[in-house]
Image (tube, rainbow, N blue to C red):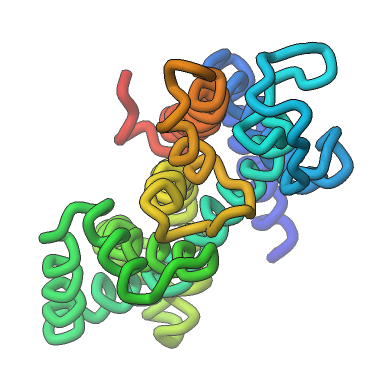
């Protein structure tokens, strides 16, 4: 009997999943964003193999060279290859973008689940903490935390991750409040399911769509934040390559060598735009209620 009931349900789930995948494929902007985002992730993973030069090795015979066949994106004031530094700088951006979101989810999802499911005192405490953090603009909070923790890529990741926790809590809490009143959750409670079973087997899996969309929104925000912190000297420290560090170093040479700022800036724009396009497509497919159409 169980098998007879389970098989149609599984078939329906597979059909729904296939339909969402086909819908995502038809969204050309989302597909383009996904491809570009995948290229950035692969570039970050294989940066040492892809980069044609050592990103930290100066070459004083080729200082401020314009883009050429030997240096496709030119060189900086120390003769370092710009393409190699952008490739390695992408690694820092992707590391912060992914790990900061993971940190925010590890803390924000359990708090959001608890606030939405238990309500009352738990919801009041979590909501007040969230409101206090949201009183500060995202970038201001990230800069302040990074300044307190000290300048480094690890501390920048922690600061950006903490800054994203309030948004994750609010999304998770809203989904929990919506889902805890649906029939299958009430049935699980009636059948003796404990809080852990209800939260992690019934509510959280059905809130995954909204959380995935939130992740694709959080990654580009983290990328921009990492570039800002590194630009201000609170993130990656020279001579280690970072897109923000490269923009900071380019300030003194904008008239003489504009490529020092143009190419790192384009890399930041491309990465953030790719994840935003992917996020818009996923939102339309996975969470039609929040779609833009």
Residue 32 position in % (x across, y down): 61, 19
Q: Name which quarter of the figure residue 170 lies in.
A: bottom left
Residue 24 position in % (x across, y down): 58, 24
Residue lying at the far right in this picture: please name it.
49
Q: Is 113 rendered above or below residue 56?
A: below
93 left or right of 155? right
Residue 106 visible at all = yes
Query: In the image, what residue occupies the spot 61% across and 21% down?
Result: 31
9 left or right of 81? left
Query: In the image, what residue occupies the spot 60% across and 33% down?
Result: 77
Residue 281 visible at all = no
Residue lying at the far front in this picture: please name it.
61
Name the one closer to the observer, 154 or 275.
Answer: 154
Name the one closer to the observer, 12 or 145.
Answer: 145
Residue 75 position in % (x across, y down): 68, 27
Query: In the image, what residue occupies the spot 57% across and 54% down?
Result: 238
- Figure quadrant of the C terminus: top left
- Figure quadrant of the N terminus: bottom right
Residue 215 position in % (x across, y down): 46, 49
How many numbered discs, if any? 0
Name the one closer to the observer, 113 or 178.
Answer: 113
Q: Is 38 rendered above or below residue 155?
A: above
Name the one closer to the observer, 282 or 234.
Answer: 234
Q: Name which quarter of the figure residue 287 lies in.
A: top left
Q: Is 93 rendered above or below residue 236?
A: above
Query: In the image, what residue occupies the spot 65% across and 35% down?
Result: 86
């Amino acid at each position: 009997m169980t098998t007879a009931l389970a098989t149609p349900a599984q078939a329906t789930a597979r059909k729904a999943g296939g339909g969402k995948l086909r819908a995502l494929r038809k969204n050309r902007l989302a597909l383009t964003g996904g491809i570009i985002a995948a290229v950035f992730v692969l570039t970050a993973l294989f940066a040492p193999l892809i980069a044609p030069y050592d990103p930290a090795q100066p070459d004083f015979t080729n200082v401020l060279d314009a883009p050429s066949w030997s240096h496709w994106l030119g060189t900086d004031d120390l003769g370092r290859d710009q393409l190699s530094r952008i490739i390695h700088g992408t690694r820092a951006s992707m590391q912060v973008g992914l790990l900061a979101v993971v940190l925010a989810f590890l803390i924000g999802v359990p708090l959001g689940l608890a606030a939405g499911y238990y309500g009352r005192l738990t919801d009041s405490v979590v909501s007040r903490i969230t409101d206090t953090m949201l009183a500060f603009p995202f970038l201001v909070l990230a800069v302040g935390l990074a300044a307190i923790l000290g300048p480094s890529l690890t501390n920048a990741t922690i600061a950006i991750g903490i800054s994203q926790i309030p948004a994750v809590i609010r999304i998770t809490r809203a989904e929990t409040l919506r889902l805890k009143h649906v029939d299958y959750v009430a049935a699980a409670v009636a059948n003796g399911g404990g809080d852990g079973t209800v939260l992690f087997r019934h509510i959280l899996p059905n809130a995954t769509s909204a959380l995935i969309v939130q992740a694709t929104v959080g990654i580009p925000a983290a990328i921009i934040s990492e570039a800002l912190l590194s630009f201000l000297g609170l993130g990656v420290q020279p001579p280690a390559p970072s897109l923000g560090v490269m923009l900071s170093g380019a300030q003194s040479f904008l008239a003489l060598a504009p490529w020092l700022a143009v190419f790192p800036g384009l890399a930041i724009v491309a990465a953030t735009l790719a994840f935003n396009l992917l996020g818009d497509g996923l939102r339309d497919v996975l969470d039609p209620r929040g779609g833009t159409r």
